[in-house]
Image (cartoon, grey):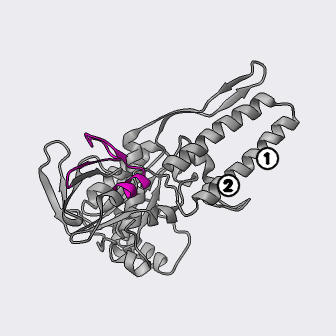
């Protein structure tokens, strides 16, 4: 996989953009003083500051000015999805040339797994996810790992465990015109990033290969496809094209492709992680057997072994987040990401 070998190598692919506030309005009234005090506090590493006496839009505009002056990546936390969506749209309007992202829970419906002993009924976990919100979450993670000018507007969902950011930062494909890259290696690397091969390549997280042309629909966008043109093993051209009419939107000399979804398996840890899962499985199965819960032991063993086979074969399984403790090789009592 074409990965940055060290921090300096990685940084050369980070988009060097500055926050630029776009608005016809200028700070007025008490806003200039508030902006100055907030900026001074940030520069002095003050942990807590409170902005009082401003309306909702006034606060948004004030904070936007603070972001522009401090030039720092920013997390804006809202208490629900509705307010988060409102703030997201406001900051998108104020920073049209920067990465303003939206990170909220992608579940439209969620029912945790359950077991009813009286009827010996096991109810499997059931959920319905929103594909568009999942894509926006992924776009947030991708921007954070590839750009410096990022504002993430989030709900409290951002405090729940997520994928290891170090894995997300490392596992990406760096493409550069003129570089040598075998199509077989590219295909393998795309699958490692959870991209699925598709003859149509008409939805995020898919790719197709037609002769010397590779189309990749990044998992974190909905409005364009990345088209790679090869001459033998040499990458000749990188184009951003429209997904329906294939018209060229932009040409690149280099491009950093992020994963197709949030959960990435670090293959260097795979064997150790699988061994840990198997060890815990043996312990839990024996625990059930000691309690004469033979049905539960069989069900647990069957499901876990099925998941292990999927991880070995594809690097992914349904509910892979349940194995995050082992896949990230965390110690007991350690805090998840």
Question: Which residue is denoted by mark 2 in the rendering?
Answer: 275
Question: Which residue is denoted by mark 1 in the rendering?
Answer: 283
Residue at x-position 33% and y-position 77%: 12
Residue at x-position 36% and y-position 70%: 148
The CA distance from mark 1 to mark 2 is 12 Å
Residue 110 coordinates in the image, percent (x, y) = 55, 34
Above or below for 158 versus 21: above
- The front one of 255 and 62 is 255
Q: Would residue 211 be counted in the magenta stretch?
A: yes
Residue 313 coordinates in the image, percent (x, y) = 51, 47
Instruction: Please tell me in which quadrant of the rendered image residue 159 appears.
Output: bottom right
Badge 1: how crowded within 10 Å, few (<14), some, or many (20+)? Answer: few
Q: Which residues are magenta?
A: 187-212
Residue 270 coordinates in the image, percent (x, y) = 58, 57
Side of 250 where 31 appears, left or right: right
- The front one of 320 and 147 is 320
Tell me the SS state at disc 2: helix
- The front one of 132 and 187 is 187
Side of 111 where 178 appears, left or right: left
Q: Quadrant of the C terminus?
A: bottom right
Side of 29 where 39 appears, left or right: right
Total numbered badges shown on the rendered structure: 2
Of mark 1 and mark 2, the one earlier in the sequence is 2
Tell me the SS state at disc 1: helix
Q: Quadrant of the N terminus?
A: bottom left
């Amino acid at each position: 996989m074409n990965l940055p070998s060290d921090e300096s190598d990685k940084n050369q692919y980070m988009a060097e953009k500055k926050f630029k506030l776009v608005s016809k309005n200028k700070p007025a009234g008490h806003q200039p003083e508030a902006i100055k005090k907030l900026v001074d506090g940030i520069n002095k590493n003050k942990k807590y500051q409170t902005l009082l006496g401003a309306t909702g839009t006034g606060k948004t505009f004030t904070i936007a000015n603070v972001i522009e002056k401090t030039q720092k990546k920013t997390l804006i936390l809202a208490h629900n999805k509705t307010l988060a969506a409102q703030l997201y749209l406001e900051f998108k309007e104020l920073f049209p040339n920067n990465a303003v992202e939206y990170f909220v829970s992608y579940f439209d419906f969620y029912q945790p797994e359950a077991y009813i002993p009286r009827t010996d009924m096991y109810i499997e976990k059931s959920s319905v996810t929103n594909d568009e919100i999942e894509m926006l979450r992924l776009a947030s993670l991708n921007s954070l790992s590839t750009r410096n000018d990022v504002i993430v507007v989030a709900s409290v969902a951002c405090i729940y465990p997520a994928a290891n950011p170090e894995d997300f930062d490392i596992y990406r494909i760096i493409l550069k015109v003129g570089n040598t890259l075998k199509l077989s290696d590219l295909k393998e690397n795309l699958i490692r990033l959870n991209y699925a091969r598709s003859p149509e390549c008409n939805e995020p997280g898919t790719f197709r290969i037609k002769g010397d042309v590779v189309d990749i629909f990044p998992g974190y966008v909905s409005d364009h496809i990345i088209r790679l043109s090869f001459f033998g093993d040499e990458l000749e051209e990188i184009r951003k094209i429209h997904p329906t009419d294939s018209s060229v939107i932009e040409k690149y000399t280099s491009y950093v492709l992020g994963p197709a979804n949030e959960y990435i398996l670090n293959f260097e840890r795979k064997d150790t992680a699988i061994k840990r899962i198997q060890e815990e499985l043996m312990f839990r199965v024996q625990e059930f057997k000691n309690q004469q819960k033979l049905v539960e032991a069989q069900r647990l063993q069957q499901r876990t072994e099925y998941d292990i086979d999927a991880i070995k074969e594809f690097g992914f399984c349904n509910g892979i987040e349940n194995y995050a403790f082992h896949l990230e090789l965390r110690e007991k009592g350690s805090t998840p990401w």
